[in-house]
Amino acid sequence: MAKKTIADVDVAGKTVLMRVDFNVPLNDSLEITDDRRIVMALDSIKSVIDRDGKLILMSHLGRPAGDGSADDAKFSLKPAAVRLGEILGQDVAFASDTVGDDASAKVAALENGGVVVLENLRFNKGEKKGDAEFAGKLAGFADIYCNDAFGTCHRTDASMVAVPEAMGGKPKVTGFLVAREIEYLSDAIGNPNRPFVAILGGAKVSDKINVIDNLLNICDKVLIGGAMAYTFSLAKGGQVGQSLVEKDKVELAKELMDKAGDKLMLPVDTHCGDDFSGDCNKKVVAAGEIPDGFEGLDIGPETAELYAKTVADARTVVWNGPMGVFEMTPFDHGTKAVAQAIADSSAVSIIGGGDSAAAIQQLGFADQVSHVSTGGGASLAMLEGQKFAAVELLDDK
């Protein structure tokens, strides 16, 4: 699935339209509280401007109504443009619209090595609708299209699909972030070193049904943690107390267990409490033996040890979803144990975005794993085996 990257095209004197993910958090004063998404795009940005290309950056931010109301102002990308200029140490122009007069003027004024950030794509209704006219105006700005926004690659928004389609025969390439995601989430999983172990956590079986189903076909072991383990426990006839379960998914859990055989590993013990708090009354019980008045909040120590040993023997590991309430001591033990085992492993390790990525960062293991995905929903979709139109239509190497 190898695609051409921005490094594979000559950008000198040419205009590059790059879709980035500048969906950064802003406080009430419209100040950026975490600029990691901007920083992560720097390699692709510098690849263009350091080679005398002209760069147009487009992104969404939040969920604005897109009706021009005063409420939309809090979703402006201007703070991101200012922050990017500070990081680059150069002027970064900001267009107050996406395809209007100001955008056209700012793009026309670009010089080699210059950058302009367009206003929030979602201020235009055509973005979410995949509108061809809107896409055509964006495409008309540039000689080259570059997709470096993996977090939205599973979507069919105009900037992801209709714009590259409107580029016709012009080069359409990936940025370095998207290239890495494809390398790990698609290529490594498509041809994994074995044993291949997947660890899936989180609250709901329903969120991960297709992922579990797909991974059971390609993994050697699939380890289940988080609250969704209690739905499987209920399907086995166990007691789950007050644990979070999806009763309407019990039959589905039974089907998955029947299909999986011994590939599917479920917790053998549970750390539970009589309240959703760190200072509640706690006990460790065998899986399926959670008493009334208690709820499962983490995998138990025996399960943590078993899962760690399974990870230690793996050659490829994919992890998506925490093992328990990792934000709350002591119910973070299971997640910590799994994260430590992955960090200590010599396997190719892929952390699938969302809470897993947050946990691996919090615990300080991000530098000890092979890849931390930048897109929770997109990484899940890729683990489900979905094909992304936004990636498929980019130029092959």
Image (spheres, rainbow, N blue to C red):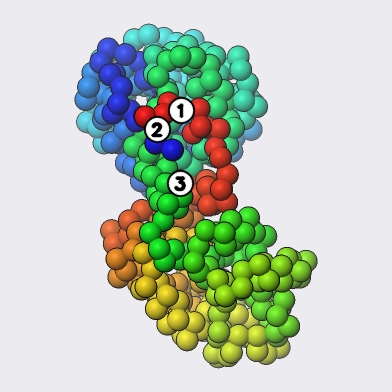
Depth check: give the residue in front, 250 or 149: 250
Residue 341 percent location from the top left of the image: 36, 72
Q: Amino acid at mark 2?
A: Lys
Residue 3 badge? 2
In the image: residue 158, left or right of residue 252? left
Q: Residue under label 3, please give it.
A: 186
At horizontal 76% and vertical 69% (from top left) the residue drawn is 251
Residue 394 badge? 1
Residue 54 percent location from the top left of the image: 31, 17
Q: CA distance from mark 3 to mark 1?
A: 15 Å
For the residues bearing labels 1 and 2, Cβ distance under 8 angstroms: yes
At horizontal 49% and vertical 66% (from top left) the residue drawn is 220
In the image: residue 281, left or right of residue 174? right
Q: Earlier in the sequence, mark 2 or mark 3?
A: 2
Question: How many marks on residues?
Answer: 3
Q: CA distance from mark 1 to mark 2?
A: 7 Å
